[in-house]
Image (cartoon, rainbow, N blue to C red):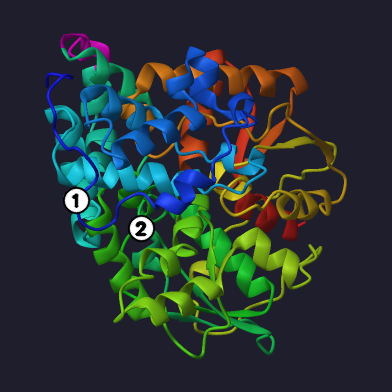
Amino acid sequence: MDEKATVLSAFQGIDIPNYDVIINCMHCGLCLPTCPTYALTGLEKSSPRGRIRLIKAVADGELPITDGFVREMNFCLDCQACETACPAGVKYGSLVEAARTQIYREKYESLLTRLIKKTMLDWAFIRQQRLKLLARSLRFYERSGFKWFVEKSGVLGLMSRKFQAIQPLTPTISTEFSSDVLPELLRPAHEPRYRVGFLTGCIMDVAFADVNLDTVKLLLHHDCEVVVPGNQACCGSLQAHNGVLDAAREMAKRNMLLFDRDDLDFIVMNSAGCGAFMKEYAHVFADDHDWSERAKRISAKVLDITEFLARTGYTPASSVPSHRGDDGGFLRTARRTDSFRGKRVGYHDACHLAHTQKITQQPRQLIKMVPGIDFVEIPESTWCCGSAGIYNIVHHDDSMKLLDRKVENIAKVAPDIIVTGNPGCLLQIQHGLRERGLKIELMHTATFLWNACER
């Protein structure tokens, strides 16, 4: 596309960047040191302040939507670290996501980027059965020996550089998906203190099924009755963050119909991105008369697993009570017997926990409760690891630079275990540790806490 060609004189239609948010930016620059892309380039246009100026110029009709504008909007990781730093409380993430929605709807991205978004976000993830079909195909590729053949035979070298680069980042697909294992209702051994809904998610369901099961076990141990509705949809966060907002709304509506129940005290999440977006349902449907009230009810009940446990007085115990009946048998699986005693444990802050949900102390509080561990702070623990949804696919080289910085900071404190609360971070950091040859165990927060309960 010719950058001099006028594509749009201003944003059009609905879901445009909120002008009141745009003009709330004071251009003070306190966001600059917190921005990963500004750190990579040193360019004003690649900073939150610079992008807000670009968005304002388009909104004012002073700038058309050009290739350069599209690149800067998509170059942003949407980590929202700038929101934590901003003294004016500017909701920068909402501006970038609205700009991306305009870009996607009006088809101003490259064909490859649109193909990735259309295939992954607007087709595979939009229906649970499609995602499971894709996951089963990937599992066959991984376990049939075909993946080994591709890697060892030199076939991989014939493929594009980008495909070669993202190959190590693909998740290992779970043997069983959590949505196929978990019954719709699970009851604790004792009188329930709370009745909570649980979202199995998309990537969590097919690639981190064990973490989903550990989360449910943890909730049962905390005397919660757990409701796991069938036929759940992806929460919509990946779609909304990448401009595919219509698909995000479609999936959100399906989940709201499942979880909008008076008998649920809370809706518990174990994925930072999913929890952050479901808390935003009220905003996403604010102008939709038919769905706004339902969205408000849902958002008000959503809590991250660490937020929920800290709020409701969780403490680890040395033994786990037996559970009665309705658990589908999965609680009778073998338990680990190794101990965390004497282990150095660090915590990586997922961006959508630390910056979007403002959850930083609760995970640390819970981890520090585990007897015998030595908790160590990772330098720049809130700095983005570079995963950022599909960012490590479409901006692979920049993503790897951010990952290098993350792994260097981890190596400085040499933990035995790193704990974090988001699937993208788990996959990204695991890749970085493997590339550096660092023998550090990586665990989801729920898995760590559940294993601590079993001592």
Say above or below: 101 vs 224.
above
Please provide the residue range marked out in magenta: 151-158
Residue 242 is situated, as x and y percent measured from the top left of the image, at 31, 43
Cα separation between marks 2 and 1: 21 Å
Q: Quick check: is 137 in the magenta stretch?
A: no
Q: Nearer the viewer, mark 2 or mark 1?
A: 1
Q: Quadrant of the N terminus?
A: top left
Say above or below: 33 vs 241.
above
Badge count: 2
Q: Earlier in the sequence, mark 2 or mark 1?
A: 1
Which quadrant of the structure image shows residue 196? bottom right
Name which residue lies at 67% across and 43% down: 87
Which quadrant of the structure image shows residue 315? bottom right
Identify the amino acid type marked 2.
Phe
Residue 153 is situated, as x and y percent measured from the top left of the image, at 21, 11
Give the residue pinned by disc 1: 122
